[in-house]
Image (cartoon, grey):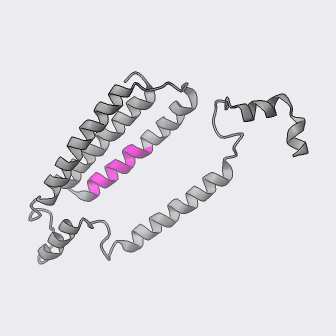
Amino acid sequence: MAQPLSLGLSIMFSTMFLCVLIAMYLSSWYGYILFLIYVGGLLVMFAYVAALSPNILFSGMSAFLFFLSAQVLIPVIVFNSVFLDTNNLSFLVGEQELMESMKILGIELASPSLISILVGLGVILLINLIVVVKICYYQHGTLRPYKTMYAHSYSKNPSRIKNS
């Protein structure tokens, strides 16, 4: 756990676990917004760390233990969320049947009243993806240089770039 990338991964999964618990027991929107804020901050930190740190191989046993613990925790979370009592989750009188059906199907965020917001967020993310891809060039992608044979051959003979 000495590598910064594995530490960031463990922080990411602990944040996701905490936000799932908050979404199950308090409010799904509060957990969702909290998760988005944490992930935004972690992505910025991940970009800086990935650009500045060297590539270190992970040991095989710790990855095996991590995935084994994930195999145990994820079914427990899913099993508890299916049988969660939704009486305290409905804030509107007469919406209990709708809340029950939405909780069983797992579509609280995709209700008909919120579909326009979700489509708008998807379009914004698609536009951001296209803009980032257009801005980033292969040779100017990260702060550290690529150490591949292909990039190395072009750096020794820059005239090859103009000829091809």
Q: Which residue ends up furthest to the top in the rendered image?
A: 2
Residue 26 visible from this viewpoint: no
Q: Would you say 161 lies left or right of 39 here?
A: right
Q: Would you say 140 lies left or right of 115 here?
A: right
Residue 41 visible from this viewpoint: yes
Give the extent of the magenta segment. 29-40
User: Residue at the location (50% across, 24% down)?
Assistant: 56
- Please provide percent x and percent y for residue 147: 67, 29
User: Residue at the location (14% across, 70% down)?
Assistant: 100
Q: Would you say 138 lies left or right of 64 here?
A: right
Q: Quadrant of residue 154?
A: top right
- Please provide percent x and percent y for residue 58: 43, 26
Q: Nearer the viewer, residue 4 or 158?
A: 158
- As for residue 132 lying within the magenta part, the answer is no
Quarter of the picture holding the N terminus: top left
- Please provide percent x and percent y for residue 138: 69, 43
Q: Would you say 52 lies left or right of 141 here?
A: left
Q: Is residue 152 above or below residue 111?
A: above
- Please provide percent x and percent y for residue 27: 21, 57
Dominant secondary structure of the residues highlighted in magenta in the image: helix
Q: Nearer the viewer, residue 131 or 137?
A: 137
User: Residue at the location (67% across, 54% down)?
Assistant: 134
